[in-house]
C-alpha cells in the first residue's frame, strides 16, 4: 500500500526575494572558500609531499555527502596524473580493505571527524602502516588524532535557513581536494598531452586530439595538379564518400600550392565566366592558403577556422605536402561559444 505524499506548503517568496536568498547562499559559500584559502598552512605542504611521494595509489574515502565529494576528488586526481580511486568506508570493512596496498595513502573526508564508519577504519589502517590524510572541520576529532596529517577546515556555517544540509562544508571540501589534485599535477609537470590520454572522449577530449585523428584523408581527400583545367579537375576527381568543400592543388613536386573551393566555383558561374573553366586551375585558385602542420591540436585548428571564417583548412607535413583537410562541418560542434 502506497503512502500518500505530504502536501508541502511553500513560503510565498517574491522573485526578488528568491534571487536575494540565492545570492546570500553563494556569498556564504564564497566567504568560506576565502577563509579556507587563508587557513592553508604547512600541513597542506606536508600533505602534498606525502601524496607526491606515494608509491601506490591515493585511496579517497568518506560517507554520505562527504563520500560524494570524495568520489569527485578521486576522479580529479586520476584525470590529472595521480593514480587514485574511491573506497566506500562501509564496504571497506566487508572485504574491500583488500583494495588498499601497503604503498597507498588514504585521504579521508569527514566534516565532524567522528563519522562512525570512517572512525572504525582508522585503527585498521594504522595497523597496516597506511598513512592517512584527514580533511575535517574539527582538528580535535578522532579522525584528526589518528591521521598523520590533518587539513583542518575550521568552523563552517552551512548555507540555507536551517543550516543543516551539507552545502558550505562540501563546497570547501571539494575546493581543498581540487587544490591538492591540481598542485600535484603542476608538481608533476602534467601537460595537455598527458591529459588528452586520460580524456579522449567528449568535446574536451576531441579538442585535445591531433588534427591527424579527425582530418579527412586518403579517399576522402580531393587533390589535383595545379596545371589541370578547372573543368578537368571536377570531372576527374569526383569521388564517393564524404565530400569536402575544397580541392587541394599541388605543384609538380606534390607540394601544396593552392586551394579551390566550392565557393570559388560558384563565383565563376555567378559571374558568367564560363571560359575560365578551360583555364589551368592555378589561375583562379587561392595561392598559398593558410595551413596547419600535422600534429596540431584540433582546438588550435578550430580557432583558426572560427577566427578567419574559413570552411576548410589543409594539413601539411614537414615537406609542405598535403596530408589531410579539416572541414568545418566536421568540427562545428567544437567551436567556442560566445
Image: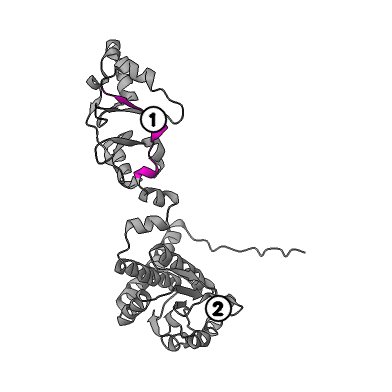
Relative horizontal placement of residue 18, taking residue 90 as reference (left or right): left
The magenta region covers: 211-226
Q: Quadrant of residue 178?
A: bottom left
Q: Are marks 1 and 2 in contact (CB under 8 Å)?
A: no
Q: Quadrant of the C terminus?
A: top left
Closer to the camera in the image, 206 or 19:
206
* Residue at image point 42% right, 58% down: 198
Q: Quadrant of the N terminus?
A: bottom right
Q: Earlier in the sequence, mark 1 or mark 2?
A: 2
Provide residue 78's location: percent of width, then percent of height: 43, 65
Q: Secondary structure at mark 1?
A: loop
* Residue at image point 32% right, 74% down: 37
Provide residue 91's location: percent of width, then percent of height: 59, 75
In the image, farthest residue toward the front: 253
Residue neighbourhood size for the residue with mark 2, other residues' Cα within 10 Å, grouped as few (<14), some (14–19), many (≥20): some
Measured along the vertical axis of the image, is residue 284 above or below residue 39? above
Find disc 1 in the rendering and name its residue.
244
Find disc 2 in the rendering and name its residue.
97
Mark linked to residue 167? none
* Residue at image point 35% right, 70% down: 179
Amino acid at each position: 500500500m502506497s503512502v500518500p505524499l505530504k502536501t508541502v506548503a511553500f513560503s510565498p517568496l517574491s522573485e526578488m526575494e528568491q534571487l536575494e536568498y540565492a545570492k546570500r547562499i553563494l556569498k556564504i559559500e564564497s566567504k568560506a572558500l576565502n577563509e579556507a584559502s587563508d587557513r592553508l598552512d604547512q600541513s597542506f605542504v606536508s600533505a602534498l609531499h606525502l601524496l607526491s611521494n606515494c608509491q601506490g595509489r591515493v585511496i579517497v574515502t568518506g560517507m554520505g555527502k562527504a563520500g560524494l565529494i570524495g568520489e569527485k576528488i578521486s576522479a580529479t586526481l586520476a584525470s590529472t596524473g595521480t593514480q587514485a580511486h574511491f573506497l566506500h568506508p562501509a564496504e571497506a570493512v566487508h572485504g574491500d580493505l583488500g583494495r588498499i596496498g601497503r604503498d597507498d595513502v588514504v585521504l579521508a573526508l569527514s566534516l565532524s571527524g567522528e563519522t562512525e564508519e570512517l572512525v572504525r577504519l582508522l585503527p585498521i589502517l594504522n595497523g597496516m602502516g597506511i598513512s592517512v590524510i584527514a580533511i575535517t572541520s574539527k582538528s580535535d576529532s578522532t579522525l584528526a588524532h589518528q591521521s598523520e596529517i590533518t587539513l583542518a577546515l575550521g568552523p563552517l556555517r552551512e548555507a540555507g535557513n536551517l543550516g543543516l544540509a551539507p552545502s558550505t562544508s562540501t563546497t570547501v571540501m571539494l575546493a581543498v581536494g581540487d587544490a591538492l589534485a591540481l598542485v600535484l599535477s603542476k608538481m608533476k609537470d602534467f601537460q595537455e598531452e598527458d591529459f588528452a590520454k586520460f580524456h579522449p572522449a567528449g568535446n574536451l577530449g576531441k579538442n585535445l586530439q591531433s588534427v591527424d585523428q579527425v582530418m579527412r584523408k586518403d579517399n576522402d581527400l580531393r587533390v589535383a595538379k595545379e596545371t589541370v583545367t578547372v573543368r578537368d579537375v571536377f570531372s576527374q576527381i569526383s569521388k564517393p564518400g564524404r565530400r569536402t568543400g575544397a580541392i587541394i592543388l599541388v605543384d609538380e613536386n606534390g607540394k601544396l600550392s593552392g586551394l579551390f573551393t566550392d565557393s570559388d566555383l560558384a563565383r565563376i558561374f555567378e559571374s558568367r565566366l564560363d571560359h575560365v573553366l578551360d583555364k589551368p586551375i592555378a589561375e583562379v585558385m587561392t595561392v598559398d592558403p593558410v595551413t596547419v602542420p600535422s600534429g596540431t591540436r584540433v582546438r588550435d585548428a578550430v580557432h583558426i577556422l572560427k577566427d578567419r571564417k574559413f570552411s576548410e583548412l589543409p594539413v601539411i607535413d614537414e615537406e609542405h605536402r598535403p596530408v589531410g583537410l579539416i572541414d568545418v562541418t566536421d568540427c562545428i560542434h567544437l567551436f567556442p561559444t560566445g
